[in-house]
Amino acid sequence: MNNEFALEMDLAEQILLLLREQPDGCSEYQLIQQLKARHSTHIPNLPLHDKLVLFRTHFLVFNALYHLRDRLWQQNSHCLQISPLCVRLLPYVAATSEVSEPDPLRAYYLDMDNLRDTDEQEVERLLASFWSRMRGDYQGEPQEFWSPDQKRAALELFELDQDESSLNLPIIKRRYRQLVSIHHPDRGGSTTRIQSINLAMEILQRYYQ
């Protein structure tokens, strides 16, 4: 099945198959991880901590989602909710499903020039936006309000094993200091990357303190 999934379906079809298995939907991050787990050849099978990999993966997934939404609409089959926090198939309702106004996000993700031409500065801005979404509406809330997706994304940014038994706060803090040393702006790193590392540390500290 994994070989068929990877080789015989385009990315939109792969996503459709995954969404049919999850009637309550899933986040963009979960969707990406499921595509990787099934060995999709249409997205980079690389960690998301690399900003260019993150951008390329995000763009390709959203490009496929908008193509899928258009296809499902034309078939009078389903509506498709597209959001970083929730991607979900919804029942087709003609009265409310038709897109009657221009959709700038759709236009952006369907233009492959935006994938080819986006420079590093723009990727840094998108990276900041990604981690802002990871923060969601939970800033300042107790630990239990942070989502598992936020924790997994933080661990991936830190390149740490997701196995709970091998992790503790001293290990996480040691890795945090290493990353700050590598990416600090005074050493040629970027402010956006440091902000991402700091947010990831905030998320992980809430889980492991």
Image: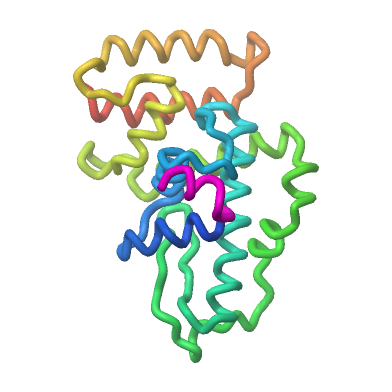
- 206 and 59: which is toward the camera: 59
The answer to whether residue 134 of the structure is visible from this angle is no
The residue sitting at 32% across, 65% down in the picture is 23
- 145 and 107: which is toward the camera: 107
**Magenta stretch: includes residue 82:** no
Name the quadrant containing residue 73: bottom right
Q: Is residue 4 above or below residue 83?
A: above
The residue sitting at 56% across, 38% down in the picture is 128
Judge left or right: residue 89 versus residue 205: right
The residue sitting at 62% across, 48% down in the picture is 59
Q: Is residue 203 above or below residue 130?
A: above
**Magenta stretch: includes residue 10:** yes
The residue sitting at 33% across, 34% down in the picture is 151
Coloring basis for residues:
rainbow
How many marks overall?
0
> Looking at the picture, how far across and down is residue 179, in whole percent?
49, 14
Which quarter of the figure is the C terminus placed in? top left
First to last magenta residue range: 1-11
> Looking at the picture, how far across and down is residue 10, in whole percent?
58, 55
The answer to whether residue 194 of the structure is visible from this angle is yes
> Looking at the picture, how far across and down is residue 122, in whole percent?
71, 39
Dominant secondary structure of the residues highlighted in magenta in the image: helix
> Looking at the picture, how far across and down is residue 181, in whole percent?
52, 8
Q: Is residue 169 above or below residue 64?
A: above
